[in-house]
Amino acid sequence: MSEINAPGIDCTPSEEKVPGSKTPEAKWYKCKYTQNREISWLRFNMRVLDEACDPAVPLMERVKFFSIFSSNLDEFFMVRVGSLVDMAQLSPHERDNKTGMNAGEQLDLIYETVHRMMPAKYSRYEKLCRELDDWGISRISFAGLTNTDMIFVRNYFLQHILPAASSGILEDGSDTLEFKSKDLYVASRLEKNGHHSTGVIKLPDNIERFVRLPGEGIRYILTEDILCGMAQEIFKKYKVLESCILSVTRNADLSFDDEKFDDSDDDFLENFSRLLHKRNMLSVVRLELSWPVSSQMIAQLKKTFDIIDTQIFIEKCPIKPDYASALIRLLPAQDRNTLLYRPYDPVWPSDISTSKSMVEQIMEKDRLLFFPFDSIDPFLNLLVEAYNRTDVFSIKITIYRLANPSRIASILCRAAENGKDVTVLMELRARFDEANNISWAKKMEQSGCRVFYGLEKYKCHSKLCLISMNTEGEIHYITQIGTGNYNEVTNRLYTDLSLMTASRKIGKDADDFFRNVMESRINGTYSKLLVSPLGIKSSLISMINEQARLGKEGYICIKANSVTERGIIDALAQASMAGVEIRLIIRGICCLLPEVPGYTDNIHVTSIVGRYLEHGRIYCFGRGENAKLFISSADLMTRNLNRRVEVACPVTDPDIRKELLTILDTQLRDNVKARTMRKDGTYEKTDLLPSTTCQYPSINAVRSSGTSTSGSICSSQDEFMVKSIHNESDSPETDNYFSKLWS
């Protein structure tokens, strides 16, 4: 297993003011038990890369993980590095409250760390290529083409690539290329009459990423390799001295808060759409080259993109390894069972009838869906039933990310067309999904839905749906609260929770929530729901402190994606110092360092990276029947708790509480995909993770039937799949067209 040896900086606590801080009361924070957020994320991505070399993972699935690692890193540079570049210019002296570093110092550390990650990336790619070769799946370089191959490739180039290729000369200032972020280009150093220049060719859009070569097996050449090898055919008036493939990564962290839009929704949509086009032309934060080039070409590229040496990365593998799915489609049927995970279709939950009304079943008791093991169909059936029932008068929903196509959005449109009052709180600022959300917002408006675009300064990240009914003069509510988006693709790829309840108090809270948000009020009061930006953080700290007062009798278990919020970190550290047993299941960023003597001795941090993306959030305070249990859309991050509209919901149904506790217990026992964080921020695999003192029932106790596959070896995701299969009832047909892996 590879690791990044870049521990957090140890800042000695003091009362000294933070240099450059705008607030005079600002002080240095204790950094004994915290680490840099960006380094923590890079370590998470290395755990993704580790899946690409795990022999227990099928070979083509490992290829997918390699692609995920690469796409994750792309987004990291676009968003996190991009925001730090902006911060370094706007607030150069502002310091991070976990390490005391300013933006410039963090950027230096990031670039240094990523460069040190590259050898591990290349070695894994080479190993994957060797194993693929053994299966007759071979990437052929341009130099490795046979004469027969060359004839085939040249014909393909002339027929498909050349007519669509666009080119320009950098030195002459005549190029019309925009160098869009993450597009592929070929750069060639040219010579003509003793004069040198740099030519650039853009890989055409909408062209296949690779070309399959004739012959036995799956032999292929990447399209960009063809374009690079045939550069002389495009620059015929020049002598091509050298060529390489390049790609720029641009800052994509657009700030929408500073944009001045009119009050009109139409104007907002129009201006927002135009703003998205800027994303491709923001500053360059990384330049990737396919292999080393001359100092002359480097100098030209540095000048063109206004970058320094540390921002240049010489790749030894494809710059965009995003063609795994296309390769999979070429696999012979007999190889698929060996090279891919066994197909798994979500099942209809055994405690929900396929023939009875969803509304009536939820009125009987609360229902829980556990994705991707459970099908989303019960929720879809609920929505369909809602627009068909005469007593349902309104459907309200928050939307952050939608699938494309989206069955959920289509049902909402049909409900509005059927005369229901459909209110959609649409968040247009869902990063990289903005265009899809804009498109669906327009379609829903055309269908008669009332579409609102959230609060000006706060993203709406909550997952809340409210169905209101007037049954014989009495108002009833069906409320759905989730941890994941209303997205049928990610519902099959992410582990998420969806609670459906007829609780009158929760329904009234949800109704108040929609009214408050639509009227731009963030200070609403709620009896059951916790709502950020004002309610979740304070409630979490209060419950942490409550456990701290119990000392060694206290217990906290939190499952989330990330932990960055300083107030939460310090509260957990204080609880640890009071003797509270704390178990954190944190997939990604964790700025809290566990097991630091005198501070976080009693905190254990686990990360699980596996077949499915761990995405559900569960908060547990206390043990057994006395535990306070919540599911939530909010991670323990500064942005989620202070700058977003999020919802956390208490879980009171005994059966669902039992299932949530079992989920936590099973994941804490995972010793296959789990990694344990050490006090320096690094992770290691352990043979057996610490017990949870067995205060929770085993997963077998909650199964209606079937046998366990667990023993001394426990893979939590495998456990949940087995449970779902054994609990399968008369399942309706579910669509089987979702094959995209999480990224």
Image (tube, rainbow, N blue to C red):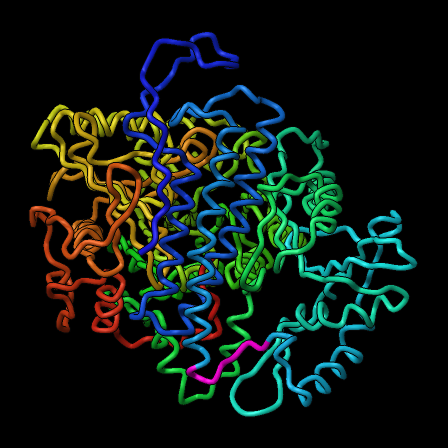
Q: Is residue 282 magenta?
A: no
In the rendered image, the quadrant that contains the N terminus is bottom left
Q: From this viewpoint, which residue is outermost toward the bottom? A: 216
- Vertical arrangement, residue 711 with respect to residue 335, above or below: above
Residue 476 appears in the picture as rendered: no
Which segment did they paint magenta?
134-140
- Vertical arrangement, residue 680 with respect to residue 598, above or below: below
Residue 676 appears in the picture as rendered: yes
- Vertical arrangement, residue 6 with respect to residue 373, above or below: above
Give the quadrant of residue 686.
bottom left
- Vertical arrangement, residue 232 with respect to residue 657, above or below: below
| Residue at 69%, 73% in the rendered image | 226
Q: Position of residue 428 (x, y in %)?
A: 60, 44
Give the quadrant of residue 65.
bottom left
Q: Position of residue 637 (x, y in %)?
A: 39, 35
Q: Position of residue 732 (x, y in %)?
A: 37, 76
Q: In the shown orientation, is residue 483 left or right of residue 105?
A: left
| Residue at 21%, 65% in the rendered image | 719
Give the quadrant of residue 339.
bottom left
Q: Is residue 138 magenta?
A: yes
Residue sitting nearer the eye, 134 or 586: 134
Residue sitting nearer the eye, 101 or 521: 101
Q: Position of residue 680 (x, y in %)?
A: 28, 37
Q: From this viewpoint, which residue is outermost toward the front? A: 194
